[in-house]
Amino acid sequence: MVAIGAVAGLYWVGALRLLEVAFALFMLPVYYIVVACLFSVWLGYHEHASTRVYRAASRDR
């Protein structure tokens, strides 16, 4: 929400053109997905999902 408000504010004061606003709004979900993936790697969640124990336990359910 803050990022959208910042983009809208920059457009309002004339610092961004409409094409740049459209690009920023298009790239926002991509940015969130990349950040979520980086956080999951940094916190170590990717290791647990690829271990055999985790896959065997999830298969037994």
Image: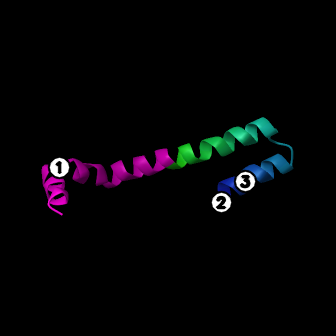
Q: Are marks 1 and 2 in contact (CB under 8 Å)?
A: no
**Helix, strand or loop for disc 1:** loop
Q: Are marks 1 and 3 in contact (CB under 8 Å)?
A: no
Residue 44 visible within the image: no
Quadrant occupied by the N terminus: bottom right
Q: Residue at x 86, y 44 (%)?
A: 14
Mark 2 packing: few (<14 Cα in 10 Å), some, or many (20+)? few
| Foreground of the two, 61 or 24 | 61
Give the quarter of the image for residue 57.
Answer: bottom left
Q: Which mark is residue 1?
A: 2
**Helix, strand or loop for disc 2:** loop
Q: CA distance from mark 3 to mark 2?
A: 9 Å
Q: Residue furthest top?
A: 19
Q: Which residue is mark 1?
A: 51
Provide residue 13's location: percent of width, then percent of height: 86, 49
Provide residue 23's location: percent of width, then percent of height: 69, 38
| Magenta stretch, residue numbers | 33-61
Determine if the magenta segment contains residue 9: no
